[in-house]
């Protein structure tokens, strides 16, 4: 424990984000890093608890708690407080090969489980991680480290999101020759073509992938395995790991769903990133338009922020669930992840821009109005009531609350139902949520493709365990 009384002397502080009016003008990151003195104070707040829940990723009754990849948080905090910054970074890189990403996009499950949060504010752990990650890149501590020897065995990884990258890195470090196949034009999965640039600058994703390339991982992009190339292409590898993500979005089944102007969230967000990378960020393709985002979660929030930067005149966000409580409920105790209402960056920007929270809770889309020529012209919504049915609780629209309002674009951000099926079908196998192996010998699966939609840090954790499994399998061959 760095400073015995640190948790009593210092308050939690996080970096002051750029104000909304400044940040919506561009696509740059708006969350700066804290200074070294601020970070050392945060680290000094860490109590180095006897049982530190922050670093122990566990699942209690279906709710995650603590860091899924077991980041050695009390250890870095102690070293940071003492000023041993490189040593602290070396502890971070032991567990997390994508720290520049998690330190920007992770919801910080660790902070929800921090003991200081039991009756006060948790340590700003993500800020400490961000500081160490930035510092390590700046100081040249992150250098390519190709394995000293190759073991002669080959592994194909399909998909280059956080799961594919983490597994490829681990297997490469252990001497396997790894080829990653990616259907997009460049690697990164949702880190590249999903999470917007202002949350995770694409230059950082590219820098990490370049490092992996220099360490010996081969990336083959623009190749959709099972469609562009037959799965027999994978036969030449000793093992195959499928990390294709949860690519099937949950659809909306209402009249007008197929009108021009109704889109799924991820292709919309990916297109925004492609425009940015092509240098077309000054264009305002949503200028004069009224956007309705269906889904009040994180992806929906990214759609709100992206629509604002694209010049939308109005943005509305529909959420079918009631709002979460302001503080933890009795059945959601520490150290579980706090299920509380948050007003995320896109919603804050919408409040600044349009004067009110874009979210309407317990509201559903009843129909989308328009025609083939003009596309979407409006949306009909209704409040819902939650009723008990044979299949559990279900929302029922309340007839008397139906209302129509103008809209030109509808973005569906209602989550994902699971992995796309064409790849498993082409390989003639079934995925198994309870195992990393599949029904086909030598073929494994990890990340969102195996578990369903999740988080970057959980995809990493899953991929590490899957890579261990691949290694065990190959050691028996
Ligand atoms: C918009 C959005 C925002 C998010 N924001 C956050 C956030 O802020 N924080 C957080 O922790 N999590 C966030 N998530 C969740 C997180 O991004 C995912 O849980 C994580 O990326 C899953 O990693 P993965 O590697 O399993 O899959 P993915 O990242 O989905 O990567 C799968 C890759 O496989 C490729 N692929 C699929 N099939 C094939 C094939 N047949 N051949 C070749 N390539 C193929 C895909 O093109 C893709 O690149 C967000 C998700 C979305 C959709």
Image: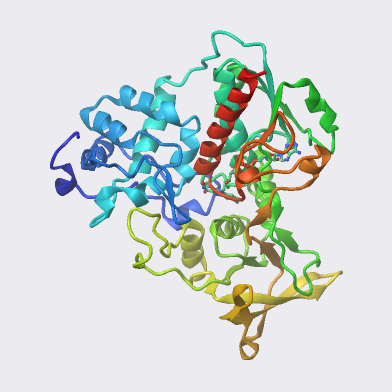
The answer to whether residue 324 is left or right of residue 203 is left
The quarter in which the C terminus is drawn is: top right
**Residue 351 in view in this figure:** yes
Q: Quadrant of ligand 1?
A: top right
Q: Give the image location of residue 423, x and y in percent.
A: 78, 41
Q: Residue furthest bottom?
A: 400
Vertical order, 230 against 249 (above or below): above
The answer to whether residue 337 is left or right of residue 218 is left
Write the residue at 36% across / 35% down: 131
The quarter in which the N terminus is drawn is: top left
**Residue 157 in view in this figure:** no
Q: Quadrant of residue 431?
A: top right
Vertical order, 386 against 345 (above or below): below
Q: How is the image coloured?
A: rainbow
- The number of numbered badges drawn on the structure is 0
Q: Quadrant of residue 36?
A: top left
Q: Give the image location of residue 277, x and y in percent.
A: 65, 39
Q: Quadrant of residue 55?
A: top left
Q: Residue furthest top?
A: 149
Observer-nearest residue: 286 or 385? Answer: 385
Write the residue at 24% across / 27% down: 83
The answer to whether residue 99 is left or right of residue 277 is left
Q: Give the image location of residue 35, x and y in percent.
A: 30, 37
Write the residue at 39% across / 30% down: 92
The answer to whether residue 422 is left or right of residue 248 is right
Q: Give the image location of residue 319, x and y in percent.
A: 57, 70
């Amino acid at each position: 424990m760095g400073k015995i009384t640190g948790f009593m002397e210092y308050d939690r502080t996080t970096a002051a984000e750029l104000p909304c009016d400044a940040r919506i003008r561009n696509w740059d990151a708006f969350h700066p890093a804290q200074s070294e003195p601020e970070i050392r104070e945060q680290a000094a707040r860490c109590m180095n608890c006897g049982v530190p829940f922050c670093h122990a990723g566990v699942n209690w009754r279906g709710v995650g708690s603590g860091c899924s990849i077991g980041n050695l948080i009390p250890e870095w905090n102690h070293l940071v407080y003492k000023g041993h910054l490189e040593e602290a970074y070396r502890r971070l890189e032991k567990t997390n090969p994508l720290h520049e990403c998690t330190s920007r996009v992770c919801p910080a499950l660790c902070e929800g489980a921090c003991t200081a949060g039991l009756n006060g504010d948790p340590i700003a752990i993500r800020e400490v991680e961000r500081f160490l990650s930035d510092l390590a890149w700046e100081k040249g501590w992150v250098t390519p480290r190709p394995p000293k020897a190759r073991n002669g065995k080959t592994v194909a990884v399909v998909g280059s999101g956080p799961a594919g990258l983490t597994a490829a890195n681990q297997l490469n470090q252990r001497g396997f020759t790894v080829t990653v196949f990616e259907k997009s034009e460049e690697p990164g999965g949702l880190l590249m073509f999903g999470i917007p640039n202002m949350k995770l600058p694409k230059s950082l994703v590219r820098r990490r992938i370049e490092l992996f390339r220099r360490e010996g991982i081969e990336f083959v992009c623009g190749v959709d395995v099972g469609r562009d190339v037959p799965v027999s292409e994978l036969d030449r590898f000793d093992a195959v790991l499928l990390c294709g993500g949860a690519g099937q979005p949950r659809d909306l089944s209402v009249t007008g769903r197929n009108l021009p102007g109704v889109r799924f969230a991820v292709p919309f967000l990916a297109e925004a990133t492609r425009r940015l990378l092509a240098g077309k960020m000054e264009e305002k393709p949503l200028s004069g338009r009224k956007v309705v985002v269906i889904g009040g979660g994180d992806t929906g929030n990214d759609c709100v922020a992206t629509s604002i930067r694209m010049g939308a005149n109005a943005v509305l966000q529909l959420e079918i669930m009631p709002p979460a409580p302001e503080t933890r409920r009795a059945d959601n105790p520490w150290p579980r992840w706090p299920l509380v209402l948050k007003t995320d960056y896109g919603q804050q920007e919408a409040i600044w821009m349009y004067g009110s929270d874009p979210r309407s809770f317990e509201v559903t889309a009843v129909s989308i109005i328009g025609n083939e020529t003009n596309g979407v012209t409006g949306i009909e919504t209704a409040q819902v009531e939650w009723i008990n049915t044979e299949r559990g609780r279900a929302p029922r629209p309340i007839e008397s609350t139906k209302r129509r309002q103008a809209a030109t674009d509808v973005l569906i951000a209602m989550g994902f139902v699971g992995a796309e099926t064409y790849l498993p079908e082409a390989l003639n196998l079934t995925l198994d949520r309870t195992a990393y192996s599949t029904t086909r010998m030598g073929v494994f699966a990890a990340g969102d493709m195996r578990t369903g939609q999740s988080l970057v840090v959980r995809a990493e954790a899953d991929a590490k365990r899957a890579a261990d499994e691949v290694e065990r399998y190959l050691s028996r061959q």
